[in-house]
Image (cartoon, rainbow, N blue to C red):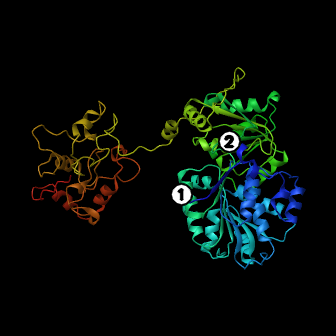
Amino acid sequence: MSGRLCFAGLHAKVFILTKFTDLGLSAPLLQAVTAEGYDTPTPIQAQAIPAVMTGGDLLGIAQTGTGKTAAFALPILHRLTAEGNHIKTPRGSCRALILSPTRELASQIAESFRVYGKFLNLSVATVFGGVSSGPQIKALQRGVDIVVATPGRLIDHLMSRSVRLDQVEIFVLDEADQMLDMGFILPIRRIVKTLPAVRQNLFFSATMPREIEGLAGELLTDPVKVAVTPVASTAERVAQQVIFVPAGLKRALLADLLTDEKMGFGRTLVFARTKHGADKVVRFLEAAGIVAAAIHGNKSQAQRERALAAFRDGACKVLVATDIAARGIDVDAVTHVINFDLPNVPESYVHRIGRTARAGATGMAISFCDRDERSFLRDIEKLIRQKVPELQRLLPEGTPVTVEEPREERRDRGARPHGRPQGRPQGRPQGNRPGRGHGGGHGGGHGEGQRAEGRPEGRPEGQRRPERRPDAPRADAVRSDAPRPERREERGDDTMGGVGFMKPHRQGPKPHGKPQGKPHGHKPRGDRPQGERPQGERSQGERHASNTNRPGEARASQGGDQPRRRKVG
């Protein structure tokens, strides 16, 4: 990508035109500009407008608040209404397409086109998410001269064939570096594929990382490069200060600053890192009697528009926003910008404080920095190539410290234990959870001695299983001479009055048609363990055995003819 590079500085004064009348704009445009009170163009406007009017590609590097919107809006309006080029837009298409990263910025760009083109017969439409797509589809189907869109919703309309872009004459990519940060590079490439090969491309960005240079090389052909300020430089009229404060005192410090008349806070923009954090700041300020509103991605489009309208009208003096609004809020007379949370991306700091000191005014940017944000501050100072001076501020005694609830406590409060408990609590009956060992449902298994030690002293002998003799084999497989069937026969084969006895079908034929080799004790039935049943209450398997008409089968299972069962484990 080759091109011609122009800078606005001491050595480039010959390129700067001092009046809008010197730029060659049409009479209706000059009339609209004069009605808005503009007489002298900004450096980006003075260099970009003549280049765009010639029909060539342009790469503009300028920070927010330098007049980029008028730098491409005025020449686009001039070209679309020039003699011999004022044609009717075909249905379902548009002649100029401007892509914007956020809804707020798209709305403001569209409003600028309407203001500058109010004496022209051109139509403007916005296409973005968060609102109904019905009105957008109707406007696109009629044919629109200028469409200002966000990539996501525009792709939706392309997939539904509500619009086609084969008639686009001018394509503008605004805030390209923020598009990259928000992950819109692939959608942009997808949109570019639907554009005609012959078109004019305008590319604007506040910073120029390598990825943006690569994208510009793909889109632009021999562009004119306009750079009016050094990359990532801060506005000269913004006084920057930093206050070192613990994280738990940030909200109290913010409320104290906003209520201090000596600080002269007017229309104030507060930036928080997260959506949830922005909402908590608003609730804290409202509790302190300060009118505030929040704007972030979780708010609906109607809520965001109401908050911005109240901020512009002065009904709300404090607007708490996330970085989604760092380049999407174009509000005049913002006196202060407060970084409640320092951004972890240094370039975002430049865009945040660029919301103040606009149109030649002055402003102040105050940043709160806790211990964990010191590294962010160092990165910011390295980027802007200057040290941010410290502002000493003392809070009144007794100021409450806001302490966030630790994550561990919130997780432990309602967490469910993972896996099965290790071991058995002291005092639980012997027959509590049958079949948990490797013996699988036969009453044996490892850990049998541990369960015997855990029984409380003085328990009646009839309520527990007899302890295994040292010379007896393990109960992994049931033997025909096991002592348990004999004790069960003494007590009766149907009643099973002992609490600690196992189910009668464990050593005989399995009821309910269950497979012979599958243990039947891995998951106890009911919500109470077997060993804690009151005296005389029987389990489901015991009731089935007592109700059967063939009690001899249960007795026969005690004899020596019963084949040894397969060991499970």
Tag 1 secondary structure: helix
Nearer to the camera, 310 or 208: 208
- Residue at 71% x, 45% y is 11
Residue 191, numbered label: none
Please rate how many residues cluster around mark 2, counting C-alpha atoms within 10 Å: few if below 14, some from 14 to 19, many from 20: many
Tag 2 secondary structure: strand
At label 2, the amino acid type is Phe
Vertical relation: 109 (above or below) 404: below
Q: Using the numbered discs, state the Cα–Cα distance from disc 1 to disc 2 in whole angstroms.
A: 31 Å
> Residue 239 appears at what percent x and percent y?
73, 33
Residue 542 placement, left or right of 228: left
- Residue at 70% x, 56% y is 300
Residues marked 1 and 2 touching at CB (< 8 Å) = no
Q: Look at mark 1 in the image and give the residue it sits on.
A: 214
Nearer to the camera, 74 or 496: 74
Nearer to the camera, 117 or 187: 117
Q: Look at mark 2 in the image and give the residue it sits on.
A: 271
> Residue 106 appears at what percent x and percent y?
71, 59
Vertical relation: 232 (above or below) 67: above
> Residue 463 appears at what percent x and percent y?
28, 40
At label 1, the amino acid type is Gly
Can residue 9 be seen in the rendering of this structure? no
